[in-house]
Image (cartoon, grey):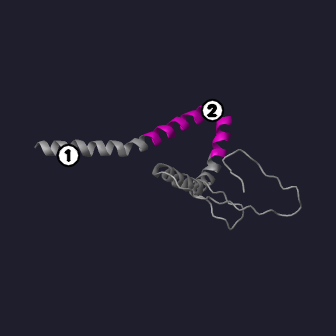
Amino acid sequence: MFDETYPHYARNDTDTLRLILMCDVERPMNPLGRAFNRLYSQLARALAVPNTGEDRRGALTAVFAAVAPLRRRAVVLKARHRGLYVLLKYSLNAMLLLLAFLPVFAVLQWIERADLAAVY
């Protein structure tokens, strides 16, 4: 058994397959440490990469797999039509930024209406 918190690597110089069992042994920790460990394990699940066809794919890995063909097309577009690429890039980023702040704006509007309703 070894501690994987230190950088390491493994080699298999044989002609046979090697099976590796990875376990997360939960140690006694304070509540903040337990919360971080849970968050990190969820992130690891979301980033799971399948080794065979039967393996499950993590949610973030699935999103990346869906976006990867678009990224390849964007690289080609950038090489051929840089101006159009830059226009599309900034337009998409601006739209995503607006979508990210839309819920914040909606909550602020709700608070403002609630304050005005309380006054009248």
As for residue 35 lying within the magenta part, the answer is: no
Q: Nearer the viewer, residue 2 or 116?
A: 2
In the image, which disc is placed on residue 82? 2
> Distance of mark 2 from mark 1, alpha carbons?
48 Å
Q: Which residue is mark 1?
A: 114
The amino acid at mark 1 is Ala
**Eyeballing the image, is 18 above or below 113?**
below
In the image, which disc is placed on residue 79? none
Say which residue appears at 63% left-offset and 54% top-offset: 65
Label 2: how many Cα within 10 Å (few below 14, some 14–19, many 20+)? some
Q: Which quadrant would residue 49 be assigned to in this image?
A: bottom right
Say which residue appears at 64% left-offset and 49% top-offset: 68
Picture coordinates of residue 56, whole percent (x, y): 63, 64
Residue at the extreme bottom? 54
| Dominant secondary structure (helix, strand or loop) of the stretch shown in magenta | helix
Q: Looking at the rendering, in which quadrant would you find the C terminus?
A: top left
Picture coordinates of residue 53, whole percent (x, y): 70, 66
On the picture, is 12 further left or further right than 2? right
**Eyeballing the image, is 89 above or below 38?**
above
As for residue 77 lying within the magenta part, the answer is: yes
**Eyeballing the image, is 92 above or below 45?**
above
Q: Which quadrant would residue 57 be assigned to in this image?
A: bottom right
On the picture, is 107 further left or further right than 94? left
Q: Nearer the viewer, residue 68 or 3?
A: 3
On the picture, is 22 further left or further right than 83? right
Q: Nearer the viewer, residue 21 or 98?
A: 21
The amino acid at mark 2 is Arg
Secondary structure, mark 2, is helix
Picture coordinates of residue 88, whole percent (x, y): 54, 38
Secondary structure, mark 1, is helix
In the rendered structure, which segment of residues is drawn in magenta? 71-97
Picture coordinates of residue 103, whole percent (x, y): 36, 46
